[in-house]
Amino acid sequence: MLTFEQERNILPLAEVLDQYFTKYPNSQLLKLQLEFEGPFLKYEFVGFDDTNRYTFEINAANGAILKERQKFLKPNESEKLNKKALNITNLLPLTDINQLALQHSELQHPFQWELDRVRERTVWKVELANEIGDQITEVKLDAHKGTLVQLKLKH
């Protein structure tokens, strides 16, 4: 059976996380998103450390850097951001998350995956559409256990 990444011919999540943390070794993540940018998928990271906020986007198929941005944090901003940092240890594989999202939705075309934080919980938010794209469902799953957190019809 092919993994989520193999089906879409994209780099594995673990590999792109390594790429991000090699570039920004002392940072924490606030956001991780996989979404379409025109015809291809891209990974987008937003992270921070004690002094800077980082935005880093790469082509999901080949790892080419699409965007890099670094911005100084305001005094005490790092302390506030620490409360919003994602827990990325022992994440369920995207293959599992995608299958679970498909099980919870009648819509069968996932097009965006975002790692987010809801209170103390790190969740995967998966958006799915019907074939013509006029109906969208958002499925939020616990990123570590896979349990359904929220199901929301958006259109």
Image: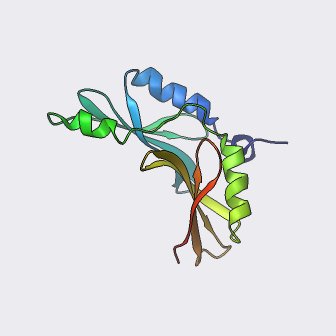
- Residue 69 in view in this figure: no
The residue positioned farthest toward the front in the image shown = 120
According to the image, what is the colour scheme of the structure?
A: rainbow
Residue 20 position within the rendered picture, expressed as x and y whole percent measured from the top left: 46, 29
* Of 114 and 123, the residue lying toward us: 123
The structure residue drawn at horizontal position 75% and vertical position 41%, both measured from the top left corner, is 3
Q: Quadrant of the N terminus?
A: top right
30 up-or-down from 20: above or below: below
Residue 64 position within the rendered picture, expressed as x and y whole percent measured from the top left: 51, 34
> In the drawing, does residue 119 fall left or right of residue 38?
left
Residue 111 position within the rendered picture, expressed as x and y whole percent measured from the top left: 60, 59
The residue positioned farthest toward the right in the image shown = 1
> In the drawing, does residue 82 fall left or right of residue 5?
left
The structure residue drawn at horizontal position 60% and vertical position 74%, both measured from the top left corner, is 133
* Of 21 and 103, the residue lying toward us: 103
27 up-or-down from 133: above or below: above
- Residue 3 in view in this figure: yes
The quarter of the picture where residue 14 lies is: top right
* Count of number-bearing discs: 0
The structure residue drawn at horizontal position 71% and vertical position 66%, both measured from the top left corner, is 108
Residue 126 position within the rendered picture, expressed as x and y whole percent measured from the top left: 58, 57
> In the drawing, does residue 144 fall left or right of residue 6?
left
* Of 69 and 39, the residue lying toward us: 69
